[in-house]
Structures are given as structure tokens and as C-alpha cells.
Amino acid sequence: MLNNVSVGRYFPIKSNIHEMNPLSKIICTTIFIISILIAQDFQAICILTLLVMVMIMNTNIPLTIYYQIIKNLKYFFLVVFLSSSIITLSFSAGLTILIDIVLIVLYLSILTLTTPQTEIVYGLEKLLWPLSYLGVKVNTLALNISLALRFIPTIIDESNYILKAEASRGIDYRVGVKTWCIAVKDMIKPAIMLSLKHLNDLKNSMVIRLFSIENKRTNFRINKWQIFDSYLLVIHIAIVIVIIMRGVIL
Amino acid sequence: MFFNANPFYQVVNKSFLYYNINCGDRWMKNIIEIDGLDFKYKDISVFNNLTLTIKEGSFTTVLGANGSGKTTLIKLILGLIYGNSVVMCNSIPVTKENFKEIRKVIGFVGENPEQNFVAETVMDEIAFSLENLQMSPQYIKEKVMTLARQLHLENDLEKEPHTLNVQKRQLVALASALAVDPKILIMDEGLNNLDSKFREEVLNIIKKLNKENNMTVIQTTDNLENCLFGDSIIVLDEGHVVLSGLKEEVLEYEDIIDKAKLDLPFIVALSNKLKFYNLIDKTYFDQEKLVDDLWK
């Protein structure tokens, strides 16, 4: 049921996007999400879809991986589509929101598939650095965000483990919605308990290996800012400006 | 050898109550010292007046059945939990204040490495401690490559550690522990998941590091076959040290090992039987040597 979800997992392969600086990737992701929120009309969404497609092509990651991500979240997308259609009383508005969410998921997948966790922490720290003047513990915040991303696959693995344990004892959750709901309900508590135990082991492992939130770390594989980072950043800024200008003019 | 207040062992082993296995001058300094430590876990006493020492440069195997306190002992040495008295590690008291000093000299491999993986690729996983020590990127890359070559992980550096097979995961955990050139390598059932042939290969690598770099190795296990690679043994039973000393001498006490719910290594048990029938006159730890001597 939850097999092969790849959100939050790094996919090691050589590509232009993999070799980008994490800071530029995070800035581009932020700009993209802002663009999605601003984009209201069909043309703007088309431009953003084209951008996502170009980005996906540049990652060299098989398209089946992206398909799997979308496929595994199909029920979530269905709920988003139905609820937004009902709330706005408009089929097209529901469809627009659905496309927006799919694009955001795809773009976040590009970020997490091409960037190891350590680089995401580094990028977030650099991006949020101005907040440290306001007393925000930027490194703690960055670590929390990256651990949350790191834990998505863990929780999915634990859930699968419990679902298989349930299935091996006779629960066939494919039979009907009611059985499925019971299986999922029974899964939640042990999945959380297992994940918490896992979290404790992980904490111990990090502490033993000299990790401390107060300490500075070196990062041996941070990609330097290259010309490709600047190109992509300029393209993203240009797109968001175009979308804003269209909104102003129209 | 230490015998403590456990009445069971006092009765069983009255004849050698204060027998002391002499380690001689082979290892001079105590790298781990525990003196009269009590530790309770939720009102259940795990250690009561625990006393033990581990010598610098030794390859020590802590043996004990499930629930004998092996993992708790390792956690005390690592400073993840604290007892009523201070554990001395490399002449430094294991306290919250000395946390970093202690960790710098210890490399740790746990039983389930997949639960301890922090990073997303094998390369990042091995580099994690070095990054925390703020080593230069160049040094980190060289160190990771050296360890990967040594442990046959060159082709897996960009893979996710979770996706590797059990043996490779253990090797990644070991490489990660060895990255900081630790003075003490602690393996808490760290080699249990390896098959016997591969375990032998890995233990030989560790043994080489033990001899060449004078790295102290502490491994816990309930499998006595593993202890043949070490030179000294500590046998724990229900939180008490019931035997401690050189491998050759500890393995003589078959009855105590049996009472601690452990089985002698096959080759030692066979030697003991052959010795009983006067076919050989000493205990063997190497199958080849035993066969050679019998053949003569």
C-alpha cells in the first residue's frame, strides 16, 4: 500500500541538478512555490508545468520514480480535488488547485531526490541565517526540518512493516474500505511507537558520533555555486516576475 | 578475576574464589575502569557493585546471555546512561562535562546499524563524525576512500545505506566508527548479522588494527565463537562479572561458562574432551593446529 514512496529520499545519480548548490535549489523551490500561489490563470500554470518538466528532464532520474510518487499520493490528490471543488463550487477551480498541488509535490521531489539531507541542512542554515539576528536558533530549525524529511521514509517503512504483520495474521486490507480503515487505525499507534524508538536510537547514534547542535560542522560535499545555479535562479525570478506582471496588467 | 556478592557463584566456585588471572605486563594501562558501580533501570537492579577493568590495546570480548547486562555496560562506558559511581575511560571520568573528550576516542558499532544511520548515502554516513570534528573536506574524502577500499565498499559509496544488504550495512557502521581513528572500538553485538566466513574476514581486519594501531577493541556477544579472535574475556551473568582474564585461562572454566548459560566454542569443547581422554595436553583455539598436532 505504501510501497516505493520516494518523497524525502535521495536518488544518487549524476546530473546538472544534483551538482547544483543546495542554497540555490532551496531558493528556486521557494520562488516556485510563491509562483504557484500567485499563478491563477491557465497560461501561468502552463509555464510552471513546463518549468517542472525541464527540471525533471535535467535530473536524469527515471520518470517512473516521479510517476510512483504521484501514484502513491493518489488518494491525497483525490481528497484535495474533491474538497476544493466542493468548497469553491467549481470544477475548474478544483482542477487548478489539484494541478498546483501536484506541481508542488513534483518540485519538492526534485529537491529531495537530488539533494542529500546534509546539503539541505546546509542550504536551510544559509537561507535562514538572517533570522539568527532575531534570536531564532537557525541551526536547530534547519536540523528539525531535515530530520522531518529524513523521517518520512522511515515512518512509511515502519507502517509497511506493521501492515505486513497484520496481513500475515489474516487481515486482507484489499477486501473493503471498512477492513482497510481498521488495518490503518491499528497501524497508527505501533508505527508511532516504532518511529519514536527509532528516533531515540538515531539521537544516540548522532551524539556518539560527536554531533552537537551548538558545534560547527564542515560539509565535505557541498557543491560550489556554479553558472548553472545562476542561470536557473534568473529563470525562476524571471518567471515569478512575468506572473506578477501578468496579474498586474490583467 | 573478580567474584562478587552473587551467592550462586560463591558456592559454585569456592575453590578459586580469589583466583587472579595474570595479564602480566602485556598491557600496562587500564583504559576502562569501573569500581563498585550500581545501576538500576526502573527499580530493577542491573549492576550491583560492578567492578572491572579493561587494558589498553587489548581485544576484549564481553560475554553474556540475553539480559546479562552487556548493552547496559556499553551504554555506561559510552556515557549514554550514568550509574552511582564514575566510569573511567582513557583516564577521563565519563561525565556529562567530559562528553566530547570521551566520544573522540570511541568508535561504536551497534547491533542494528540501520537504526543508527544518519545520512542518506554511505559516503555521508562514513563522513558524519569527521564533519562533526570539522576536518577539512579534502581529508574527509581521502579518509572515506581509504576506509571504503579497506572494507570493500568502493562501489556502494553513493548508495543509500538502508538499501544495502545486512552485511554491507554492518560494514558501513564499522567504517563510520573507524573514521575517527578511535583509541577504543566498541562493538555491541556488532558482528552478529555477518555470516561466519565474512565475520572472520572483518574480525581479521579489526585484529590487524588492534595490533598495528594499539586500538583497544571491546566486543559484546553471546556467541563464544567470536571470542576466539580476542585475547581477553569478561563473562557477565545477571549483572555480575563471573570470569575475567586472558582467553586461554577463562575458557578453562567450562562449568562457570555453562552456568552463565553460554556454550564453549566448538574447538575448545572438542579440545577439552580430547584432553580428558589424554589425547592432547593443551587447549586449542585453532582447528588447523589441532588437526596438525593430532596427525603428528
Image: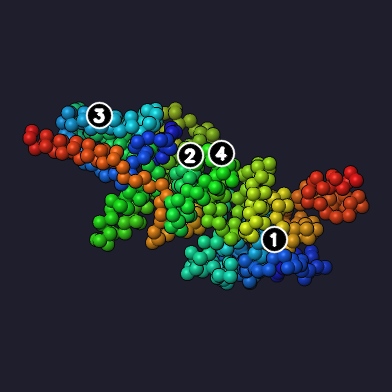
* Mark 4 residue element: loop
Q: Which mark is drawn over residue B165?
A: 4
* Amino acid identity at mark 3: Leu
In percent of the image, x 18 and y 31: which residue is there? A44
- Residue B151 at x, y percent in the picture: 59, 45
Which residue does the numbered mark 2 point to in the structure image?
B159
In percent of the image, x 24 and y 34: which residue is there? A100
Q: Earlier in the sequence, mark 1 or mark 4?
A: 4
Task: Using the image, determine if residue A98 lies above or below residue B146.
Answer: above
Q: Which mark is drawn over residue B234?
A: 1
Separation of residues labelled 2 and 3 (CA atoms)? 30 Å
Residue found at the very far right of the displayed protein: B278
In percent of the image, x 26 and y 38: which residue is there? A232
Separation of residues labelled 1 and 2 (CA atoms)? 38 Å
Separation of residues labelled 2 and 4 (CA atoms)? 11 Å
Separation of residues labelled 4 and 3 (CA atoms)? 39 Å
Q: Of the residues tagged 1 and 3, which is closer to the observer?
A: 3
Q: Earlier in the sequence, mark 1 or mark 2?
A: 2
* Mark 3 residue element: helix
* Amino acid identity at mark 1: Ile
Q: Earlier in the sequence, mark 2 or mark 4?
A: 2
Task: Using the image, determine if residue A111 lies above or below residue B203.
Answer: above
Which residue does the numbered mark 3 point to in the structure image?
A50
What quarter of the picture does the N terminus of chain B occupy?
bottom right
